[in-house]
Structures are given as structure tokens and as C-alpha cells.
Image: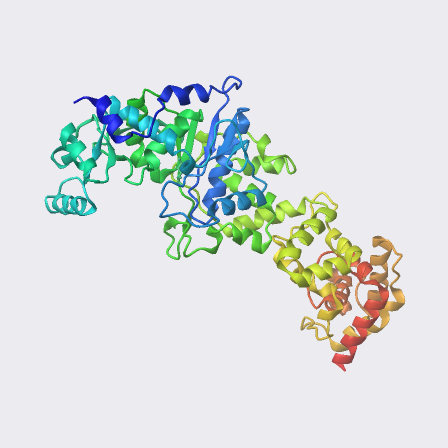
Amino acid sequence: MDYNKLADLLFPEVDKTPDYWENKYKDRKLPQGAEVTRYAPSPTGFVHFGALFATLVNKLTAKKTNGVVFLRIEDTDKKREVDGGVSGIVNTLKSFDIDFDEGATFGGEYGPYIQSEREEIYKTYAKELVRQGKAYPCFCSEQDLNEMRETQEKNKENSGYYGKYAKCRNLTFEEVEQKIKNGEKFALRFKCPYGENDKVEINDLIRGTRIIPQNINDVVIVKSNGLPPYNLAHVIDDHLMKTTVVIRGDEWFPSLSEHLQLFEAFGFTPPKYAHISPIQKLDENGNRRKLSKRKDPEANMDFFAENGYPIGAVKDYLMTLINSDFEDWRANNPTASIYDFDFSLNKMSASGSLFDIVKLTDISKNYISHLTNTEVYALALEWAEKYDQKLFESLNNNKEYWHGILNIDRDQPKPRKDISHFKEIYNIYEYMFDENFDGNVVFPEKFQKEDIKKVLTQYLNYYDENDDQQTWFNKIKDLSEQIGYAREVKMFKQNPESYRGHCGDVSTIIRVAVTGREQTPNLYDILKLLGKTRLQNRFSKVLEKMS
Ligand code: GLU
């Protein structure tokens, strides 16, 4: 067979040779050891939590080595594509402060970075394979292929286009020519040079070295619509874009031998590979399952934005899933950039990480506790503007007051950890707002009504907004003594029958009367922020309801 003639017959429109592209895309000038990585999503319209995970792993790998991370859109499967899929991905990632050194919408010298714009490049290389006798046209119809599959199933044979089933492998030039003249459409298949017992050794940066069976199928590398599937497209792209590490989901792991065969057929050096396991979740029965787009709202990145988890917290959480020693590092470096962490691909778990919202909540509380009140205010305001009009107005109308609230127990070595996401911020502090206070509070049962009344009628004689915390507390002790309570808890414990209670009880009565809660942050700060007039009003309301 004259393969040159066949190549021209199949791809008459292709007038370039691979040399043209090889010259156009020069080697990158990067420091020794720099890795080039890429995030290569298909624009299916849903940005999965795993997408941020994979992007971050790519970014960390590139950053750590002073390399490059780029964004490539893999849209050759038009059936899976949705409108706005590309901007959806880019915007979601941008909203998590993830950008790329180059790529779709970012620009760069190795583009176009959208696969559907690279048809000419793919065809040049496909034509070259035909010229070398490594690929051939297949005219089998959908029906032929279905029949083949059924026969294979019936005979319990491996499925695929191989051996005696690879009918079009042996078409003569004249047969091909005739079919093309008849207007028949063809797909291009790779002529797989391996057989059933062949194996290949692969070295995955996360999974280690493995020996896996060679692919034996003559896989389609250009579809009848002229576009290649993922296999050929990514091989050409990663070669021309000079990718050094392919980091991708482990659903691609089984096709690795097929991909490596293509690198080999073109004579390209393959990149290194790291297959990451999907993020999993424990189901009700304690079994692991994949985080599911259908069942788990938190699988969608929008969940985090809508609930107001700070992006820094979500990223910190992802980092703990990526490398488990991140948490210790973070404890010692509470405000450092995640990119300063000594990330490593081979510290990643090959069996996959478990998503745990409780853990995310803890990390987020910790993260927010290390921000200043001004930072929390700004983030909450930004979130509320988009998602919560009531909070937005409250934050705007009570700017100083909110700053005060957010400062309670913050500026200290062990800051308070109560806020995990902005959606709950108003509820956490709702008692600071009069609109939520109607005087209907419930005191712990152990307090006598008359004692409560005594505290609420007398405390204002003691309270002075200008007192420092020590003086303030001494006054609570004075009041305690006055109404037959112990000045000190210790005194009470030594002689419980001599007192009606102790100074802590008096604080509790005041706390419940102004906030309706038995547990709150520092009462001194709360009272100071509320101010004496509010305090007076709240006490009156409570007394009114009690009478
Ligand atoms: N487009 C592929 C996907 O969305 C990406 C695989 C890769 O990163 O090479 O699964």
C-alpha cells in the first residue's frame, strides 16, 4: 500500500507536515526541574469540587518548581458541551482566586488552548500517522459496531476493535478510494502494534510503578466529524504545549497504555503522569462512595460561594485533602500562603480523600478566627451583597457596631472560633440587634424569680460603661454580695449553704437577660457594645414579661 497516497486521499485539505508545528512551538525556556502542568476540563457546565482540587494540585506542582500551569479546554466531544461551560469554569476558578499562567482566556504562546480550534494541528499529525502506515480509515457504521459488540458479548470475548474484528484494517487502497468516492464517512483508527499478552510498565507519581496490560484495540483517533477524541487530542497538545506532568482523574488510568502507544507512535517523549483519585464521601452505612453531583450539594463549587465559606478556608481544606501533613504546617504557619507549604505529589493518597463537611467547618472557623475584624467585615459584606440582602443592609447601616461585634474575643492569642461561613453570621450575633429581642428569655431553672428581679433592678446602679474589665467584674461581685451571693466561686464551694449562689450566677442572670443565651462570647464586651440604654431597655422588657 502506498501510504502517502492514502494520506493524501484521506486528508487532502492538510498541506502542512508536523515539522511546521514543531517549529512553531519552541521548547520553553524554564529553569532546571521546572514542571509544566495543565488543568484540562471539558466544559460540561458543572464545576465539581474535584475540579478545584485538581487545579490546585496542578498549580502547586508548577509553583513549587517555578514552572508553568495552563488551562486547556477539552471540547472535542461536542455532545457533552454546554453553553457557557468555559466561562463557567474560568469564573468559578477565578472566584476562588485561581488563575493560570497561560491558557484559554489567559493567552500564551502555545495556543490555541481550546481544542476545537486545533483541528488543523490534529489532522496534520493524524495524516502523518497514515503516511507511516500506523493509522487507517474505518467505514464501519454504528450498526456494524453494535453487532460486533453483541457477538463479543455472546462469545465472552474482550470488547473492542482488534484482531479478526478489525475489519477495515485490511482494506485495499482501491476499496478505500471507492468508498470515499461514494461519499462514505470514515473514522481514523490507530493500528495498534500490540497483542493480548503484551504488558507495559508505567510509573505513576502517586500510584508508583505498575505493570499493566497493553491496549490491544485499534482505537478511533479521528472521529467522522473530523475531530479527534481525547486520546489523540491530549497527546498532541501535551507534546506541543510541552507539558511535563499530566495530573488528571484516575478514570483515565485504564487508558494510559493506549495513550502511551500514541506517544510512542509519534516518537514523542511522554510526560510524567499522576492520576488523582476522586474525592469520596462516607454514605449512611459507612461505605465510601464518590462525591456525587446528583446527591451532594457540596460537590458543586457554587455551594461554597452561596454559603459564604471564605475562599482561603476552602483552599485550606483542600490542602488537607491533598497532603495530610498540611494541617500541622498550617497550625505553625497560620497566615502563610498555601504555596509556601512543601507540597508533594507523592505524599498524595492513592486511595482517595474523604470529604467531610465537619472538618471543613472547623478549618473555616480556624481560618476566620485568624482574620482581623476589618477583614471579616469586608468578606462578609462582599458575600452579603450577592447573597443576603438583610445582612448586607445590617452591615452597611451598623458599620462600627459590626466591627465591634466581630472584634469580640478576636484580638488575643486564642481567638474565638465561632464563625465558619458568612451565611450564619447574623444568626450567631442576632441577640446584638434589638429587632430580635422581645424580652422573652428563659433563665436556668435553678434561679429564683426574686433573685433575678433583684439583679435586674439593681445592676444598673453598678454598671458603668467606662469601667475596665476588672472593675466591671468587681462590681458584679459587689452586687453578688449585696444580694446574698458569694463574691467568689471558691467561697461558695467551701460553704454552699451560706449563699444563694455565686458571682458566676449573677453574670449568668445578666447574660441571659440581655442575650437570651446562657453561652456567649465575653459578656463585658457585649454589654459595652450594647451600651447602658439598651441594657436598661432589655432589663425592663424582661422584667415586664416576668411580672
Ligand atoms: N478533559 C478531561 C476531563 O475533563 C481531562 C483529562 C486530562 O486532564 O487530561 O476529564
Between 83 and 275, which is closer to the camera in this rendering? Answer: 83
Percent position (x, y) of residue 294?
A: 41, 56
**Can residue 519 be seen in this snapshot?**
no
Is 342 on the left-hand or right-hand side of 393? Answer: left
Picture layout, residue 317 above or below residue 264: below
Picture layout, residue 186 above or below residue 235: below
Is 339 on the left-hand or right-hand side of 512? Answer: left
Picture layout, residue 159 above or below residue 431: above
Residue drawn at x 85%, y 58% as measured from the top left:
472
**Can residue 174 be seen in this snapshot?**
yes
Q: Quadrant of residue 485?
A: bottom right
Is 174 on the left-hand or right-hand side of 213? Answer: left
Percent position (x, y) of residue 202?
A: 32, 26
Percent position (x, y) of residue 153?
A: 14, 46
Residue drawn at x 54%, y 46% as measured from the top left:
92
Q: Quadrant of residue 24?
A: top left
Between 459 and 124, which is closer to the camera in this rendering? Answer: 124
